[in-house]
Amino acid sequence: MIDRKYIGTALPQATLEIEKGRLRFFAKAIGETDPIYTDEAAAKAAGYSTLPAPPTFIFAAELDADTALAALKDMGVSLARILHGEQQFTYFAPVCAGDTITVDSRFTDIYDKKNGALEFIVKESVVSNQHGSKVAEMRSVIVVRN
Amino acid sequence: MARLAFADVNVGDALPPLTVPALNRTTLALFAGASGDHVPLHIDTDVARKAGMPDVFGHGMLSMAYLGRFVTRWVPQAALRSLDTRFVGITHLGNVITCTGKIVGKEERDGEKLVRIELQAINQFGEIKTAGEALIALT
C-alpha cells in the first residue's frame, strides 16, 4: 500500500520549451495531417502566431522532466504496475512553438478499491506560460495494480 | 474550416467518425519518443510480459491524442475548453480504433455558448477503450 502521507505532496516544477520539430514529430506519431500542426504558413493562415501544440501535447512536460514518474517511484510504486486511469485538460489559452510552459503539480488524493488490489493516485496540475499566464489545468488518475 | 455556429448544432447530432490505422509497434515507438512517455510497458515486449500483459499495448495518451484529433478536425482547437477521458480498456496491438462523438448538451456559461460532446474510442469489435467528454465554445 502507498503511504497516504504523500497526499498533498508537491512535485518539482517541470519546464518544457515548445519546439517546432518536436511538435512535428508528435503530429507524425499521432497521425495528425491537418497542416496547421506542421506547416507554419498554414498555422498563420488559421490565426496562430506559429505552430500550435495539439491539445494533449503539454502532458509531455512532466514526462520529459521525469518528475511525475520519479515521484511515483519514490512512493514505492513499480512503473510496470501502473495504468493511466483518467486524464482531464481544461484550456485557458493557446500554447504554441516558442512558448515555455511550466507545470506545477500536487498529488491530491490516494485511495484504493478491491481491498487494496487497485490503488488510485490523483495528480492535479497548473500549466503556465513564460508570461505567467495560466494556459491549462490537468488532472490525472494513475491506477496501480498491486 | 467552415465555422460552425451554436445555432447549427443540436443535442443528439453525431460528429463525423475518425478511424485510425491498426495499432502497431512502430506507432508505439514513435509515440513514446514524441510524447516523452518512455515507460517500457509500451515499447518492450519482454517488460510487458514480465508484468503479466500479453504484449506491449497502447498508451492511454495516444488514444486521447486521437480523440483530440477527432475534435479539432470538427472545430478549431481554439474552441476547445476541456477534454476529459477515462481509459476503460487496454488498446492492444492490431486494434483499429474509431473515434465517435455526439452532442449531449448545449449550455451558456460565463457568457460563452458551450457544446458538450460525449466521446468514445472503440475498437473493431465494438469494445469501448476510451470514454470521455469535450466542451467546446461556439458563437
Image: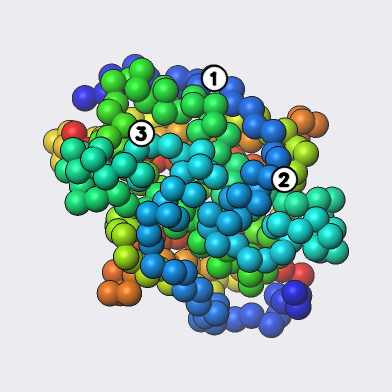
Q: Which of the chains bears the disc numbered 3? A: A
Q: Are marks 2 and 1 on the same chain?
A: yes
Question: A83 or A92, which lies in front?
Answer: A83
Question: B139 or B77, which lies in front?
Answer: B77
Question: A11 or A90, which lies in front?
Answer: A11
Q: What SS does tag 3 mark? A: strand
User: Residue A44 lies in what quarter of the image?
Assistant: bottom right
Q: Are marks 1 and 3 on the same chain?
A: yes
Residue projecting furthest to the left:
A115
| Residue at the spot of label 3 | A121
Residue A125's place in the image compared with B119, above or below, is: above
| Residue at the spot of label 2 | A20
Question: A65 or A38, which lies in front?
Answer: A38
For label 3, count other residues whose C-alpha is less than 10 Å away and answer few (under 14), some (14-19) or many (20+). many
* A20 sits to left or right of A65: right
Q: Which of the chains bears the disc numbered 1? A: A
Q: Position of residue B51 (x, y in %)?
A: 20, 39
Q: CA distance from mark 3 to mark 2?
A: 33 Å
Name the mark nearer the viewer: 2 or 1. 2
